[in-house]
Amino acid sequence: MLRRLVVLGVSLCLIPAGIATSTAAAPPTQAVAPASASLALAPVTEEAEPRKRRPYRATIRRTKHGIPHIVAKDFGSLGFGSGFSAAETSLCNLADTLLTARGQRSRWLGPGGRYNDQVTLDASNLQIDALVTDLRNRRVVEQLLADRRAGPTAEVRTMVKGYAAGVNRYLKKVGPRGVKDPACRGAGHLRTRATELDLWYGVYLANLLASTGVFVKEIVDASPPTLTDPGLPELPLPVAADVDREKLLAGLGRDPDAGFGSNATAIGGAASSTRRGMVLGNPHFPWRGRYRFTQQHLTVPGRYDVAGASLIGSPVVNIGWNKDVAWSHTVSTAYRFTPYEYVTLGPSTYVTDAGPQPIQRRTVSVTVKRPDGRLEQVQEDLYRTAEGYVVDAPALLMPWGLATVWAIRDANAEHLRTIDSFHAMGKATSARDLLRKQDWGGGIPWVNTIAADRFGDALYADHSVVPNVPDSLADVCMTVVGRVLNEVAGLPGLDGTRAGSSCRWRTDADAQRPGIFGPRNLPDTVRRDWVANANDSYWLPHPAQRLEGFAGIIGCERCLRTFRTQMVYRYVSDRLAGAKVTPKALRGFQHANRQRVAELARAGGDLDKVCAAAGGGDACTVLRRWDGRSDTTSRGTHIFQEFVDRLPANAWAVPFDPAAPLTTPRDLRETNSAVVKAMRDAIASLRLRGIPMDVAWGALQVAGDRGAPPIPVGGGEASAGNANAIASRDPVRNAHRYRAVTYGSSHIQSVAFTGRGPRPFTILTYGQSENPRHRWSSDQTRLFSKERWVRFPWTKKQIRRQQVSRVRVGAPR
């Protein structure tokens, strides 16, 4: 007998009725090898919380720069301490996250205000509220919380409940008018208590960052075609050669010019001076908003000890280390969703192989605040098929026309396992065990994992949540337009008519749940020398290794590596050409600020020739003397960046070669008229704006996040091959400067394992506190400017030496 598992109203797969949908056996403690080929999805041991409802109790010791070290006797109290400490330094951001998760932005901030998460979601308050309200009306998170396979474990639910209680305890202590951060002091929405359900919806929305979150406007604004408004013509069908690839990628949440990314390098025992593992992680995340990191150290004595950084609203460490293993993440190239194209019979009926089905119309009512303070109800319509939300996206080749309609099935909308995955990773005993626990969790939403352990193993893996759409399925299920999407953007558009049968996502026997790839069909490697990733696909985790034969929806193979990837790899390979990597050398990679494009362009004097041909005058003198870097003291960096911004696609004489992926393309076309014009226009643009040629980079590029003084910032754009990637996006301070930084290098960690345990160095580039009046707001920004690190206190002795405050917090359960 078969039983159908339905999550979020989406039919996932057919499961034999006798098969359990949860796991209960304890996992083996030893690591498994080699890599994922023999990984078993055994569950991670879950310690039961005390049955007696004891009060929450936690001790928070803050060390220099405001880093909280939270100790508790149980996981609920640990979550309580985490929530309390997060509220102390990030309350306004946390409150905004909860406001969004309640679908109440319009109620407090007005419907026309913008919600921009600084990554993929940019919509009006009303649009985001409409989507969230529908999710809540459908009780999406509540259903997942009750699902033993797709939902969280009891231990993690206890942590989240404790986190909410900690936030409420802090708010009760200070009151809305006692909040010192001017961004939300006295705000009415602070009077609403945080609930664990609010936090879970916040986690759920973060899961959707690279999927449903990309299409909020296209979902909420979707409406059936009419005779007077039929949508874009569906004939002639689009041809891949005529599609603007960059525009399409940007619309799918993969903007080549403003991507979401990170670097991470793991050094194994064979390449390390310590003969143990080391990790350098540098997530490129926003310096403000929902995806801002906060640092914390979480300890349940004898059971749990992990430190690093967490996104706002997370009671667990997302990037960090314990005594055995350190890890970081980079954004993966895999898609988290597939669009389905359905033939329609009229504006409200779609065809399936089981017969015509009505498009579900869902009307939501959102409370909005008018300029005069009055509250009104505004209605919005959203539409769904069995697979997911209908989108109307003509610019993305997915219009709602008279003959067809598109809907999105989202793999990250079908689980609530993210916190479990990170929590389990915090208990890992080795790099291999980290991957095993990650697979058991089954909830890594949109990132690769790069890790190294004290035994000297280095791991790369993309074991994130990916729809189980092997190439064999895509080949027989793509529609005509779906093939264009796949050819241009690597995203297969599937036949919705067969979405419930032959074109349904597959199920792997080793997957944590139906509909996603299992570990054996996802790329990974464990090496003894080193691995790295800088947001290119899984194909090349090390110069000597190719990972091939995986589904196209995960990423490309034998494809171009960015100049940033080349730079990250060069740091390691150049060092190993003369010596092993020491902990100090690893930290040095972060602030070397070499620019890979500059190194290639200057070969053979080509850059100087281009400048001379452009009649650059004093700019050429500056470029000739330039150190080729993006240090704060470098002079000429801005000229080169303006040049790179204008370089044509055919700027290199030697094109990309899959046989030499880290040395091609190369050889600047110094006589090419378009290349010379790029230099001429770059110099002219700087002169027009009155920017001197011979000026230090640090005088031009400064911090631009909320409350930041004009602190000089090193690093530069990824387009120039900077590993220390820094960008200016909608700065809130110092916007009059040439470049005010609001995005890029964030929680940077360099963790080396020694015979005495981990030796962590970190820097939180924008500081621990979001309150611009607080001493922890820009202290680490100043350190980052000076290329200095924080010696993160890990042991009890180190914490005592650096301790600046100690408080015991508690509340009834």
Image (spheres, rainbow, N blue to C red):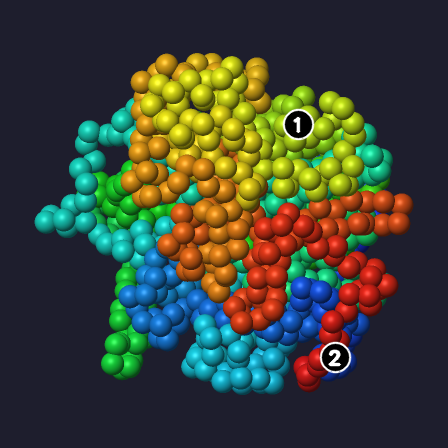
* Residue 198 appears in the figure: no
Amino acid carrying label 1: it is His
Give the residue type at disc 2: Arg
Q: Which residue is the site of mark 2?
A: 808
Residue pictured at 73% horizontal, 78% vertical:
807
Q: Name the spot of residue 621 as percent of width and height, x first.
A: 45, 27
The location of residue 795, given as percent across then percent down, is: 83, 60
Between the residue at mark 2 and the residue at mark 1, the CA separation in whole angstroms equals 47 Å
The quadrant in which residue 276 appears is top right
In the shown orientation, is residue 129 left or right of residue 544? left
For label 1, count other residues whose C-alpha is less than 10 Å away and answer few (under 14), some (14-19) or many (20+).
some
Crowding around mark 2 (Cα neighbors within 10 Å: few <14, some 14 to 19, many 20+) is: few
- Which is nearer the N-term, disc 2 or disc 1? 1
Vertical comparison of 350 with 167: above or below: above
For the question of whether residue 369 can be seen, the reply is yes
Q: At 44% from the left edge and 79% from the top edge, which residue is drawn? A: 187
Q: Which residue is mark 1?
A: 542
